[in-house]
Image (cartoon, rainbow, N blue to C red):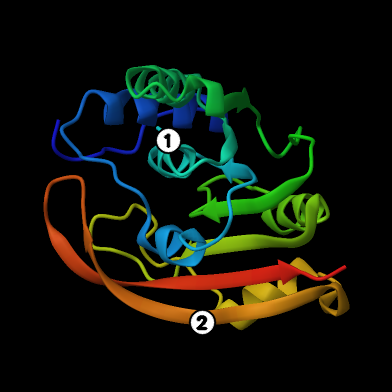
Amino acid sequence: MTYMEPPDAATPAEFWESLHQQIAASPWELSVNAVLAAAVGDLPPGAALDLGCGQGADSLWLAQRGWQVTAVDIAEAALQRLRERAADERLSDRIRTERHDLADSLPSGSWDLVSAHYLQSLFEFPRARILRDLGGQVNPGGMLLIVDHGSVAPWSWNKGATIPTPDETLAGLDLDLASWQVLYCEARDRTATGPGGQTAEVTDNVIALRRTA
């Protein structure tokens, strides 16, 4: 398969499970998100939480650099693929997987990094509450990194979607900004490659916050 068709599913778990089964069977190459690599590359390794980890490119990249990673996804197919890749790369001791429907349950812990790349859904999803609650688990000096789709790619399913600006997203989190330093809150353009190998200019909304207290 060279193009991801939206699965016909009744529940979020069924949808994402089917999607990740498609991805696992496709030739689409997965690699670390560039924003994560740039934002985290110079940080000392610690405890990281990778939300909506998918098949684990970001988790593997972090583990390769000494981070202890808790990788969370709703799809067991994605987590199984990540475990296989971690075993192949001898990184199983640095990556723990947890299956969560974040609308119903959250991982617990304390983190030096919480990374949420494209934690967006076609289903109703209490995203702001999730990010606010997990932001409360970030250690002082730690980072909350949020990267959202800031535009609709030609291969996307959500044509006509209303997309908030980075400032609107940050305001919607309702964080106590007295306890956070805003490192950046901005829109960035990049060239993206779709599942069929096609390319397009897209926008990412990028928010990086450092916990100060």
Q: Tell me the residue at 21%/40% (across/down).
A: 29
> Residue 100, relative to residue 47: is it above or below?
above
User: SS for tag 1?
Assistant: loop
User: Visible in this render: residue 11?
Assistant: no
Q: CA–CA distance between discs 1 and 2? A: 25 Å
Q: Nearer the viewer, residue 82 or 158?
A: 82
| Relative depth, front residue between 117 and 19 | 117
Compared with 112, 159 (above or below) is below
User: From where the camera sits, is residue 134 visible?
Assistant: yes
Q: Position of residue 2 (x, y in %)?
A: 13, 37
Q: Which mark is residue 139?
A: none
Q: Position of residue 189 (x, y in %)?
A: 32, 77
- Using the image, tell me which numbered label, if any, was put on residue 56: 1
Q: In which quarter of the image is the C terminus?
A: bottom right
- From the viewer's perspective, tell me whether residue 165 is left or right of residue 191: right
Question: In the rendered view of the protein, which quadrant contains the N terminus?
Answer: top left
Instruction: Identify residue for label 2.
Output: 186
Q: Residues within 10 Å of mark 2 (few under 14, many from 20)?
A: some
Residue 7, image x, y percentages: 36, 31
Between residues 204 and 120, which one lies in front from this camera angle? 204
